[in-house]
Image (tube, rainbow, N blue to C red):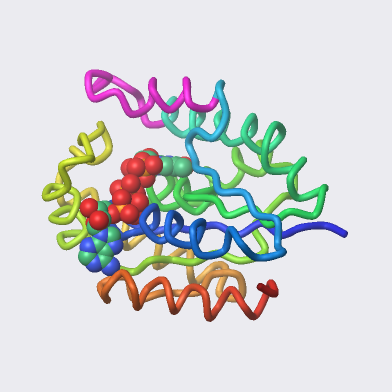
Amino acid sequence: MKGKFITFEGPEGAGKTSVLELLMTELSGTEMEMIFTREPGGIHISEKIREVILNKEHTEMDSRTEALLYAAARRQHLVERVVPAIESGKIVLCDRFIDSSLAYQGYARGLGIKEVLSINEFAINGLMPDLTFYFKIDPKVGLQRISKSSEREKNRLDLEELSFHQKVQEGYEKVIDMFPERIVVIDAEKSLEKVVAEVKNKLKKVISF
Ligand SMILES: Nc1ncnc2c1ncn2[C@@H]1O[C@H](COP(=O)(O)OP(=O)(O)OP(=O)(O)O)[C@@H](O)[C@H]1O
Ligand SMILES: Cc1cn([C@H]2C[C@H](O)[C@@H](COP(=O)(O)O)O2)c(=O)[nH]c1=O
């Protein structure tokens, strides 16, 4: 039996990683076999690409180069980690995937959502998520959260202007309109406990635990 591929999306500081960590703890005792992973990263080569993309000294990086690097990291992560897990029946919970590229590179960087979708179609070769949670939050609130966090050093993308992060949010709204059946919107400005409860509730509709 094939597993499922579930992704978590949203602006900076929306709470995706915190929710995934709590889900990992709460669902680890259940019968469902799950893996938790992230983009860009999740495996050796893609973590190396992550370091190149997010290094705050790499201010000269061209937007198309950035889009191609995310797509390359995505391809390797899918082949090495995501596809084998799904084929062995596991549930894969992934922090960010293709919708990040559509919102950040396609819309906020101005490369075009369709153009970025097209390079990513080559990378993913048909493997779209079964379900995506979009963590909706005012970008200002998300950025305030990461500024307060002592564990989080700001990367090159975090350091973009507020106007860039507002465009990311607009980009996500467009992506949601393109894929309304796949993407579930979660109010990420609620307390962490409430967000986790809402995600678990929606998850129960696609997997049993
Ligand atoms: N619902 C919440 N209410 C208040 N603070 C929260 C909530 N969720 C997460 N936080 C805090 O906000 C900060 C960012 O959270 P987290 O790293 O989980 O976000 P993220 O969506 O993974 O961000 P990024 O994509 O930028 O890495 C952390 O300090 C976390 O403790
Ligand atoms: C997958 C992906 C990510 N990004 C951006 C989004 C964030 O600013 C960083 C990743 O950092 P996080 O702390 O792990 O959320 O990269 C992007 O622009 N395009 C993408 O495809």
Q: Considering the image in quadrants, where does the C terminus appear?
A: bottom right
Q: Residue at x 51, y 56 (%)?
A: 24
Q: Is residue 196 left or right of residue 43?
A: left
On screen, residue 209 above or below 123: below
Q: Residue at x 68, y 43 (%)?
A: 82
Please identify the residue farthest to the front as the structure is shown. 29
User: Which image quarter has ligand 1?
Assistant: bottom left
Magenta run includes residue 45: no
On screen, residue 152 above or below 172: above
Q: Residue at x 49, y 72 (%)?
A: 177
Q: Is residue 7 visible?
A: yes
Quarter where residue 57 is shown:
top left
Residue 120 coordinates in the image, percent (x, y): 60, 41
Q: Is residue 190 left or right of residue 17?
A: left
Residue 146 coordinates in the image, percent (x, y): 19, 49
Q: Residue at x 64, y 80 (%)?
A: 205
Please identify the residue farthest to the right as the structure is shown. 1
Q: Nearer the viewer, residue 67 or 9?
A: 9
Q: For the magenta stretch, what is the residue range? A: 46-63
Quarter where residue 52 is shown:
top left
